[in-house]
Every structure is written in structure tokens, then in C-alpha cells.
Image (cartoon, grey):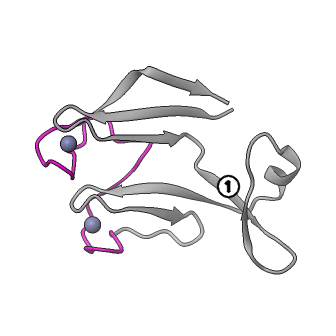
């Protein structure tokens, strides 16, 4: 069961959507990373890791963090001010540097 949320900046209106369980992946026979999408439970059972989308709170760069190879800094500007896009509530918006993100009550999806 995955929950979707949308965070909206109160200053500039920038919106970011996220799913609670990120992007589970498995390695196929060729050794390539493949994402398993809901509701393919057979593929989900093979998953060995998870890429979760993160946002740099300094430069606004969005990137994936691999659960098997986690990073603590933004790959672009090297700051440690990064946050999971599912957990942006009350975080300062990096795009306008004025507003903070709040959960959009109009979007609440469950897949
Ligand atoms: Zn903003
Ligand atoms: Zn950055």
C-alpha cells in the first residue's frame, strides 16, 4: 500500500509529488537495474533495494537516493541540506527561498 502526497510551497506555489515507498528495484538477468511498479507483486518480491527521490533544499536539485548506496549530500552543490520528497512538510522552499512546503489537502492518493 503506497500513499501519495503533494507538497506545495506557500511562497511560489512550486509543487512536488511523492510516494511513500519510493521506487523499489531489482536487478535483472543482464545485471541492469529495473524498477518494479505497483501492483506487480511478483516483481516487488524480487526487489533488493529502493531509490527514493530527494530534493536539495539549497539548490532545488532533485535526485534519487539508492537505499544500497545512500548519499548524505546533494550531488550538484554538495550541501547536506537534502530531504526526502515525501517529507518536505515545513521545509524551506529552495526555489523562492521564502515559502515553506505544506501538504496539499486536495491530493491524497492511495494505490
Ligand atoms: Zn517557493
Ligand atoms: Zn544542491
68 relative to 91 in the view: left or right: right
Q: Residue furthest front?
A: 13
Task: Name the residue rendered at 51%, 23% in the picture.
Answer: 108
90 relative to 22 in the view: left or right: left
- Residue 44, image x, y percentages: 79, 51
Task: Name the residue rendered at 33%, 70% in the picture.
Answer: 73
Image height of 53 relative to 103, above or below: below
- Residue 54, image x, y percentages: 42, 56
Task: Name the residue rendered at 21%, 51% in the picture.
Answer: 95
Please provide the residue range marked out in magenta. 74-101
Task: Name the residue rendered at 47%, 24% in the picture.
Answer: 107
- Residue 76, image x, y percentages: 31, 74
Q: Quadrant of the N terminus?
A: top right
Asked if residue 91 is among those painted magenta in the image, a careful observer would answer yes
Instruction: Count up the numbered dots.
Output: 1
Secondary structure under the numbered disc 1 in the rendered image: strand
27 relative to 107 in the view: left or right: right
Asked if residue 94 is among those painted magenta in the image, a careful observer would answer yes
Instruction: Considering the whole magenta stretch, tell me its main secondary structure.
Output: loop
Within 10 Å of disc 1 (Cα), the crowding (few <14, some 14-19, many 20+) is: many
According to the picture, the residue beneath numbered tag 1 turns out to be: 24
Amino acid at each position: 500500500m503506497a500513499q501519495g502526497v503533494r507538497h506545495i510551497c506557500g511562497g511560489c506555489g512550486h509543487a512536488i509529488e511523492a510516494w511513500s515507498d519510493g521506487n523499489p528495484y531489482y536487478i535483472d538477468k543482464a545485471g541492469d537495474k529495473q524498477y518494479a511498479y505497483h501492483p506487480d507483486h511478483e516483481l516487488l518480491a524480487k526487489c533488493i533495494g529502493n531509490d527514493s527521490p530527494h530534493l536539495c533544499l539549497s539548490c532545488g536539485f532533485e535526485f534519487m537516493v539508492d537505499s544500497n548506496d545512500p548519499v548524505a549530500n546533494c550531488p550538484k552543490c554538495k550541501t547536506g541540506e537534502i530531504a526526502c520528497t515525501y517529507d518536505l512538510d515545513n521545509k524551506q522552499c529552495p526555489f523562492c527561498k521564502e515559502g515553506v512546503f505544506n501538504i496539499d489537502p486536495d491530493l491524497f492518493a492511495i494505490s
